[in-house]
Image: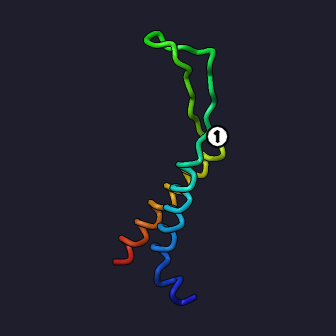
């Protein structure tokens, strides 16, 4: 517990990086064959993030910023 208090900012930053990196690569895709570009006739694939993934990405970035601020205020 003593080490956790000592490295509180680093732990929060690592948790934020883990949450963000996991959710950034958690996108979905949809094959949208009805929509065609005007330059070519190939099928389009739409990539998107669900609302839950977007929320987790923003929480992860917030934890990274909080962790960096805690580390800077410690010194």
- Provide residue 3's location: percent of width, then percent of height: 51, 87
- Provide residue 51's location: percent of width, then percent of height: 65, 41
Task: Name the residue at the top extreme.
Answer: 38
Q: Nearer the viewer, residue 61 or 44?
A: 44
| Residue 65 vertical placement versus 37 (above, below) | below
| Viewport quadrant of the C terminus | bottom left
Residue visible at 53% across and 83% down in the picture: 4
- Provide residue 9's location: percent of width, then percent of height: 46, 73
Residue visible at 50% across and 73% down in the picture: 11
Residue visible at 47% across and 67% down in the picture: 13
| Viewport quadrant of the N terminus | bottom right
| Residue 69 vertical placement versus 25 (above, below) | below
Residue 39 as seen in the image, left or right of residue 55: left
Residue 36 as seen in the image, left or right of residue 70: right
Crowd tier of the residue under label 1, counting other residues whose Cα lies within 10 Å: few below 14, some 14–19, many 20 or above: few
Residue that badge 1 annotates: 50
| Residue 7 vertical placement versus 62 (above, below) | below
- Residue 27 figure quarter: top right
Q: Which of 66 and 44 is in front in this view?
A: 44
Task: Name the residue at the bottom extreme.
Answer: 2
Residue visible at 54% across and 66% down in the picture: 15
Q: Disc 1 on helix, strand or loop? A: loop
Q: Which of 53 and 47 is in front in this view?
A: 47
Q: How many marks?
A: 1
């Amino acid at each position: 517990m003593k080490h956790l208090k000592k490295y509180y900012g680093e732990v929060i930053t690592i948790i934020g990086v883990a949450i963000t990196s996991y959710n950034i690569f958690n996108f979905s895709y949809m094959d949208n064959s009805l929509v065609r570009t005007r330059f070519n006739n190939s099928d389009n694939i739409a990539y998107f993030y669900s609302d839950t993934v977007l929320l987790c990405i923003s929480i992860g970035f917030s934890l990274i910023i909080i962790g960096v601020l805690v580390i800077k205020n410690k010194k």
